[in-house]
Amino acid sequence: MPGYDFLERFKDVEPMKPICKDEWVLYKKIVDGHELLFTATDMRRKNDGIKATIEVYCDRVSLGYNDFSLAQIRDRTHLSNSCYRNLEALEDSYTKEDLSYDMDRFCKEVWPTFVQSSMPVELAGIPDSPTEFWLKPYVIQGGGTILFAPPGRGKSFTGLLMAISIDSGCETIWPVNIGKVLFVNLERSASSIARRIAQVNRSLGLDPERPLLTLNARGRSLRDVRDIIRRTVTRDNVDLILLDSISRAGLGSLSEDVTATSIIDLLNNVAPSWIALAHTPAHSEDKTFGSIHFQAGADLEVQLKSQKDDNTLGIKLTIVKENDIGKTIPLTLAYEFGAFGMEHVRYAGLNEFLTLDKPDDLSFNDEIYHILIKTGKADATSLAEELKVDRTRISKVFNEDPRIMEVGRVGRRVQYGVVTTS
């Protein structure tokens, strides 16, 4: 449980009146100049009733806590007695029965107070209010973004590139509003992440040693570190978290609708805005692995496709689901790698990554024709290597498509281009 210093933001709570603030229910009582504070967190409805984590403080010192069903008198009494054994400052003026009475009254009021804080209100419309971004157009202020691709395609570097751009206010690639970022690393070792942070910093022209607030929790689940994230968001005024990755949420099978909604709800509850990295199913690169409720719950879904070319990695970002921002144009970036990893990031050239630049709905023949329009000419061997397909497929298109003709030779290789009309 968090220490009392963490609850300093509640120091102005009015005594003798339960309130709900920042998903905490609190009750303060002053006895002989000493402050008693009852707190409830993690309120939820279960089959056996309302459960919550209850903690009692006296003058900045925790007397005890427990997580239990609030209707169970045995659990309330056990916690009350345990706390009273640690209550030395008020033993002459505040009896065990007094504490038991206050505990019972507080536990009775926890759920009604929590529910009352969530009641509907008359919400006035805000005319002529544009969507605000942390990083345009991929990260909305107050929203959630899922960035998805198969493993090993550059998601982590891209997520860090977005996070560090926002955290530093660097606009080398995107327009940003500067905000405090927390990187929640559930995938890799701390040393691996430190190297990647240095590489992304260097690629953006920043000091390689510039720090990024990072929670290294490899081997732990999102559920395990939920309270750590919530506390860090409050302590450090975090505006956005980057989660790597959704597959480590630890809330159940990602194919289950209830798991997907629970993960989205958890992210929305612990962070003002978020970017979450996600994998794709084995049979498709066009959607996030798991329930459709991931797509429903995110404000933006961004598909990442990549193409490796020697020491350069092409990254294409396409928004495939959006709320409130309208249609956007895909962006292709080039990540340049050297002896020490990623060294530079830039916008990709017009014909630099042929596989990424083609429209997604082309047939194979149309794809080849589209490439020849852009490049002018190509031979079957080179093009097959570029597209990573069998050479005979390329040759078949060259020989049978009436829109394509032989245009010359380079050495022993026949060059083909599009048929021109006079």
Image: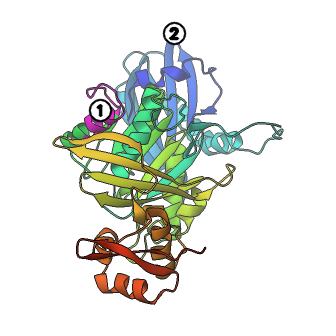
Q: Which residues, given as a range, are shown in magenta?
A: 196-213
**The N terminus sits in image quarter:** top left
Residue 16 seen by the camera? yes
Q: Relative to residue 371, is residue 341 drawn left or right?
A: left
The residue labelled by disc 1 is: 202
Q: Residue at x 46, y 53 (%)?
A: 350
Residue 205 is inside the magenta segment: yes
Compared to 364, does 192 lie above or below? above
Question: Residue 210: x, y in percent?
Answer: 31, 26
Q: Amino acid at mark 2?
A: Gly
Q: Relative to residue 410, is residue 113 drawn left or right?
A: right
Q: Residues within 10 Å of mark 1 (few under 14, many from 20)?
A: some
| Helix, strand or loop for disc 1 | helix
Q: Residue furthest front?
A: 422
Along the line of sight, the residue nearer the viewer: 346 or 416? 416
Compared to 157, does 149 lie above or below? below
Would you say the residues marked 2 and 1 are in contact, meaning their CB atoms lie under 8 Å apart?
no
The residue labelled by disc 2 is: 33
Question: Residue 304: x, y in percent?
Answer: 44, 58
- The answer to which of marks 2 and 1 sits earlier in the sequence is 2
Q: Residue at x 32, y 53 (%)?
A: 313
Compared to 321, does 346 lie above or below? above
Q: Residue at x 29, y 58 (%)?
A: 309
Give the quarter of the image for residue 398: bottom left
Give the label on residue 305, or none: none
Q: Residue at x 40, y 34 (%)?
A: 164
Q: Residues within 10 Å of mark 2 (few under 14, many from 20)?
A: few
